[in-house]
Image (cartoon, rainbow, N blue to C red):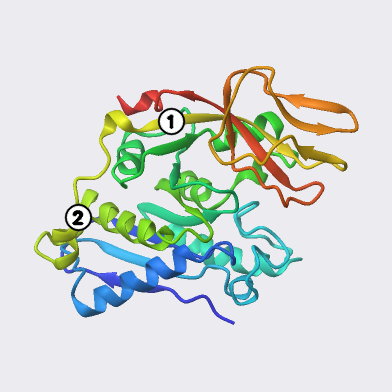
Amino acid sequence: MTVKTVFHHSLAPGKTLAIMGGVHGNEYCGPAATTKLLSDLDSGAVALQRGTLQVIPVANPRAYAQKTRFVERNLNRYLYPKEEKRHYEDHLDPVICSFLDSADVLLDLHSYASQGGPFVFLGGSQSRPEEVAFARALGVRDFVCGWSEAFGSGGKGGDKESQGTTEYARANGALAVTLECGHHHNADAADVGYRAILRALAHLEMLAPDCEAARSLDVGVAAESQRCVWMKSVFYKEAECTFVKPWQHFDRVARGEAIVSGAKGELVAPEDGHIILPKASAATGDEWFFFGTEGTFPSAEA
């Protein structure tokens, strides 16, 4: 089994934009969006005026074939080339990392298990202004910041646990964001991803303005309607613990409000905030949900 990688080089210099889908095998919007993109590039509906576009439609092909999140290890955690390869995904690491090494900008397309719409994962407090501007140009209203900081406060595996595609790319100098296109089975998830790719190309001045795809782009989301939630902590599923209600992504909770009940009592919100990516089906020991609070976009934006 191989990892398919497609390159489109324009004849004018510019940025190298990397697009990824299928890092998790049960998230179908990325493969669908990138497949449409490649078809439209072949037909001429999408045309590049400068730069290089590199695409991996399905980053974890075996998991995708099995319709499962991963085979032996979450490909979007502990992402770095390993001398000792113990899991199937360890063999994918050098392929993915080499692909990312050549990128100036990364857009990684995902979806999630709880109900909800699209949002973008930004970096943390040290996000570069160019990265924030790129993310806010993708046509999405909601943003989540502070992924690595959340793992630092509650993660159980050290710095490498939170290192996925975007963290690896940023460490090597690229601008990088993850777009969660909505629930796994949202009817519009693939279109959200496809439109975001077009917006990414347009923002980087890579999309030829006279092509059909460029002419179809609308104004997008007004900056004043966009909101940013900062992740504070990650919680792992414990035995005999359950959610007190069927939480959805971005649900608001008040300080002291019960989130989880279990044999040891209730887990309550430490302050007013939001539930982020709750997973009702999480197994004991797995990531269960994140907690965050609403705030301003990274100050580096200014």
Q: Amino acid at mark 2?
A: Leu
Residue 258, compared with residue 65, is above or below; it is above
Residue 170, percent across and down? 46, 45
- Residue 137 appears left or right of 31: left
Q: Residues within 10 Å of mark 1 (few under 14, many from 20)?
A: many
- Residue 62 appears left or right of 140: right
- Residue 59 appears left or right of 159: left
Report which quarter residue 102 is drawn in.
bottom left
Helix, strand or loop for disc 2:
loop
User: Tag on residue 217?
Assistant: 2
Q: Nearer the viewer, residue 131 or 181?
A: 181
Helix, strand or loop for disc 1:
strand
Q: Residue at point 57% right, 65% down?
A: 94
Tell me the quarter of the image containing the N terminus: bottom right
Residue lying at the far left of the rendered structure: 210
Residue 25, percent across and down? 59, 67
In the picture of the structure, the residue carrying the numbered disc 1 is 228
Q: Amino acid at mark 1?
A: Cys
Gap in Å between the C-alphas at discs 1 and 2?
A: 24 Å
Q: Residue at point 49% right, 34% down?
A: 145
